[in-house]
Image (tube, grey):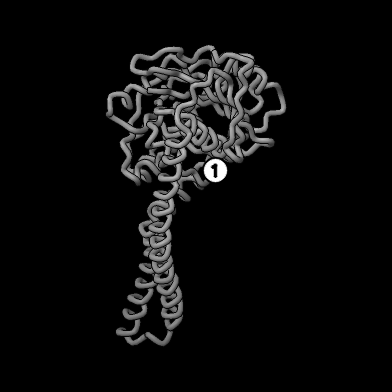
Amino acid sequence: MKLIIQIPCYNEEKTLTIALDALPKHIDGIDEIEYLIINDGSKDETVQVARDWGVNYVVSFPQNKGLAKGFMAGIDACIRNGADIIVNTDADNQYCGEDIEKLVRPILDGEAEIVIGERPIDSIEDFSPLKKKLQHLGSYVVRKASATDIPDAPSGFRAFSKDAAMHLNVINQYTYTLETIVQAGRNRMAITSVPIRTNPELRKSRLFHSMGGYIKKSMLTIIRAFMMYKPLVFFSICGLIPFIIGVIYVIRFLIFYFRGNGLGHTQSLVVASMLIMIGFMTMILGLQADVIAANRKILEDVQYRIRRMEAENSGRDDTAGRIEVDAKSGNKNTDDKHDSK
C-alpha cells in the first residue's frame, strides 16, 4: 500500500520546510510513503527547498495556473507513480501533519473513498467572525448541492483512494474543494469527514484577496457544479419561476375578462405569453443540458479507463532517486544523485 502526499506550492520557500517536516514518515497499514509538490510557477526557491528536503516528485508549471489546475496535475502524477492513496495538504502548514493518519484510516478500513478533514472553524483564532459564518454557510450550500453531509467543504486537507482519484475531473480554475465534493456526491462516491487540528497561521491566504471576491467565486463554483451535474433540475427550477408568474398573469386576465373588463388588461396576456415562453424554453434548455451531461458522463468513464491504463502501464517506480514530472506531458526523468528522504 503506497501513500503519496501532495502539496500545491506557489512561492512557499519560507514555509515549505516546516510543512514537510510535519508530515508522517510511517503509518500503520501503509507500506510506503512518498512526497510530491506541485510548483505552480513559483518565482522563489520553492523547488530547490523541496529538492534539498528530499521530496520524491516535483510537478512544475512554467507559470501560475491556479490551485485547481495544480491539484489535478498532482493527482495525475500521483496516479502515474503508483499511489494507492493520495493525500492533499497545504504548504503553509495550516493542517496538522500528524492527522494524515486520521484521513487515510477510513480508506484503509474500506469505509470511504474520499475523506475530508473537518477543521474546528469556530475555534480558529485566525478566522474573523464573518469568515467563520461564511465558511459554515458555504458548507451548508455545498451539502445541499451535493447531497452529502460534509461539514467543512472548503477544507483542502483530504485523502482519496486511487479509484476515487481516477474519477476526479475539476473544470473550474478557482479551486477544487467545492466542485470535487459536488461531483463525489452526485456520482454516489463514499465520502466522509474526520475532525482534524490546525496550526497557527504562518501567512495570509492567497486564494482570495477580499471576502466579497471569495463569496462571489465560491457561489459561482457551486452554481456551475450544480448546473453540470444536475442540469435538468437546475434549469427546471429556473424555468418554473417565469412560467408560474406567466400563469398568474393569465389567471389575472381571466378574472378581469369574466368581470367584463378584459379589454383593459390585454397587456397581461402579452406579459404572460412572454414569461410562459421564457419558462418553457428554459426547461427545454434543461433537457438539452441533461443530454450533454449524459455525454459528459461517458467521457468521464473514458477518462477513468485511460487513467487506469496509464497507472497499470507505468507500474511501480522502485528508483530511489528524485523524479521531475513535466506537468504538460506527464513525462518523468529520474535523478539518482540524491536519495529521497
- Can residue 50 be seen here? The reply is no
Residue 331, x across and y down, in percent? 59, 35
Residue pointed to by mark 1 = 217
Residue 212, x across and y down, in percent? 57, 40
Tag 1: Cα neighbours inside 10 Å, few (<14), some, or many (≥20)?
A: some
Residue 17, x across and y down, in percent? 59, 14
- Can residue 232 be seen here? The reply is yes
Amino acid type of disc 1? Lys
Residue at 68% over, 36% down: 63
Nearest the viewer among 265 and 69 is 69
Residue at 67% over, 32% down: 41
Residue at 44% over, 19% down: 123
340 lies above or below 116? above
Helix or strand or loop: what does disc 1 sit on?
helix
Q: Where is the C terminus found, in terms of image quarters?
A: top right
Nearest the viewer among 191 and 122 is 191
